[in-house]
Image (cartoon, helix red, strand yellow):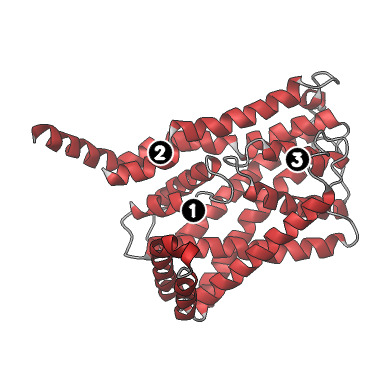
């Protein structure tokens, strides 16, 4: 059955194992391949205060997921139940965890939501609006963070972090601003397409793919431009209250996501109030690197760049390395585990496994 194969292709065993191997490989390197010996997290003085900050970090991850679930419920105008929203978000995060950052779980989200039997066109429309809201948050918060830190640099020097010969601050700054400008253009395009002149955007897309070297993408471009028209029809007339609630949920979700590292650093050291903005801003820069990473879920990349960005706030290089592992244990690996558990339950609920079983029986009888 094509529905089953379309969904399961996002969750192949190979796609799950690759990020696990990369992530665990880097973690093992940090733990054992170090002349300073095995230290790090074991050096944390697990006082009552440290446990509180760890619980705060875990709590922020719960807030993050609740924000996603609430936003999906709002965007679907309660057509999706809380149970459906929970399962969709968990599978969406699962797909993101086993896909390269630039791809994310968007393609999987469209396929997953299509099985929920929503009204025609609403599935892709919700995914597009979700993408727009996420990028809009990033476009707004990045300049605010740079303004808040004033003359403090959000870019690391990469000295004494183990790979300063691979990348330098200048290259990173160019990479970041190139990525930011690209996302800014994409956000403006989505805003224009969804709320102002979707027909003009559709015509622009179809004109671009007429170029000789882009003709092979014409079918996908046509489908995407049609989806933009549907999304615009569904959402452009929504009241202000609808958008305030949707953007509010987005703001809570992403802010909680970025504050996790702030809490983890408080496990080990006291940070001044103004420095929390620097840590927050550095994560905005890190996010660009993780998004363009070619590895699934930025596995390996995330663990390597964490010490470069957050090392100045931690006592030793080894502590910084191992705190990066704790960060990933809280923010990344749970989605693979939860996704593995939720997937068979969801397949059964939407009836894909039953339809697949009936199809096999018919083939055997035929």
- Residue drawn at x 77%, y 45% is 262
Give the image location of residue 316, x and y in percent: 87, 31
Could you tell me if residue 299 is visible in this image?
Answer: yes
Could you tell me if residue 350 is visible in this image?
Answer: no
Count neighbours of disc 1 (C-alpha within 10 A) and say few if under 14, some if 14 to 19, many if 20 or more. many
- Residue drawn at x 88%, y 62% is 150
Residue closer to the observer: 134 or 359 = 359
Distance (Cα) linking label 2 and label 3: 31 Å
Give the image location of residue 279, x and y in percent: 80, 49
Distance (Cα) linking label 2 and label 1: 17 Å
- Secondary element at tag 1: helix
- Secondary element at tag 3: helix
Which of the 4 quarters of the picture holds residue 181?
A: bottom right
Mark earlier in primary sequence (2, 1) = 1
Mark earlier in primary sequence (2, 3) = 3
Residue closer to the observer: 15 or 125 = 15
- Secondary element at tag 2: helix
Name the residue beneath numbered marker 2: 343
Give the image location of residue 336, x and y in percent: 52, 36
Q: Is residue 68 left or right of residue 285?
A: left
Count neighbours of disc 3 (C-alpha within 10 A) and say few if under 14, some if 14 to 19, many if 20 or more. many
Number of numbered callouts drawn: 3
Name the residue beneath numbered marker 1: 106
Question: Can you say whether 70 is above or below 168 in the image?
Answer: below
Give the image location of residue 227, x and y in percent: 41, 67
Name the residue beneath numbered marker 3: 306
Marks 3/1 in contact by CB < 8 Å: the verdict is: no
Question: Can you say whether 199 is above or below 75 in the image?
Answer: below
Question: Can you say whether 234 is above or below 93 in the image?
Answer: below
- Residue drawn at x 83%, y 53% is 170
Question: What residue occupies the far left of the structure in this picture?
Answer: 366
């Amino acid at each position: 059955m094509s529905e089953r194969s379309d969904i399961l292709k996002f969750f192949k065993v190979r796609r799950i194992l690759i990020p696990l191997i990369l992530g665990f490989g880097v973690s093992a390197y940090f733990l054992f391949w170090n002349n300073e010996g095995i230290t790090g997290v074991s050096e944390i003085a697990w006082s009552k205060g440290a446990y509180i900050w760890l619980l705060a970090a875990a709590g922020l991850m719960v807030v993050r997921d609740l924000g996603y679930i609430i936003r999906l419920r709002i965007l679907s105008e309660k057509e999706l139940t809380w149970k459906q929203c929970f399962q969709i978000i968990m599978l969406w995060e699962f797909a993101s965890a086993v896909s390269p950052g630039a791809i994310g779980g968007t393609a999987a989200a469209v396929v997953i939501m299509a099985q929920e039997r929503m009204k025609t066109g609403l599935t892709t429309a919700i995914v597009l609006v979700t993408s727009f809201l996420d990028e809009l948050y990033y476009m707004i918060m990045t300049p605010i963070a740079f303004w808040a830190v004033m003359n403090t640099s959000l870019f690391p020097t990469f000295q004494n972090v183990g790979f300063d010969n691979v990348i330098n601050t200048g290259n990173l700054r160019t990479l970041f601003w190139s990525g930011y400008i690209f996302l800014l253009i994409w956000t403006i395009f989505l805003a224009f397409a969804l709320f102002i002149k979707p027909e003009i955007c559709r015509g622009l897309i179809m004109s671009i793919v007429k170029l000789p070297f882009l003709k092979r993408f014409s079918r996908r471009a046509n489908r995407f431009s049609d989806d933009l028209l549907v999304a615009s029809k569904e959402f452009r007339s929504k009241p202000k209250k609808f958008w305030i609630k949707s953007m509010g949920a987005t703001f809570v979700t992403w802010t909680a996501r970025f504050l996790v590292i702030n809490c983890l650093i408080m496990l080990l050291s006291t940070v001044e109030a103004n420095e929390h903005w620097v840590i927050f801003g550095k994560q905005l820069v890190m996010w660009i690197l993780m998004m363009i990473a070619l590895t699934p879920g930025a596995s390996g990349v995330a663990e390597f760049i964490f010490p470069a960005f957050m090392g100045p706030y931690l006592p030793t290089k080894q502590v910084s390395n191992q705190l990066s592992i704790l960060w990933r244990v809280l923010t990344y690996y749970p989605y693979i585990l939860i996704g593995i558990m939720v997937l068979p339950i969801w397949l059964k609920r939407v009836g894909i496994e039953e339809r697949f079983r009936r199809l096999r029986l018919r083939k055997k009888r035929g």
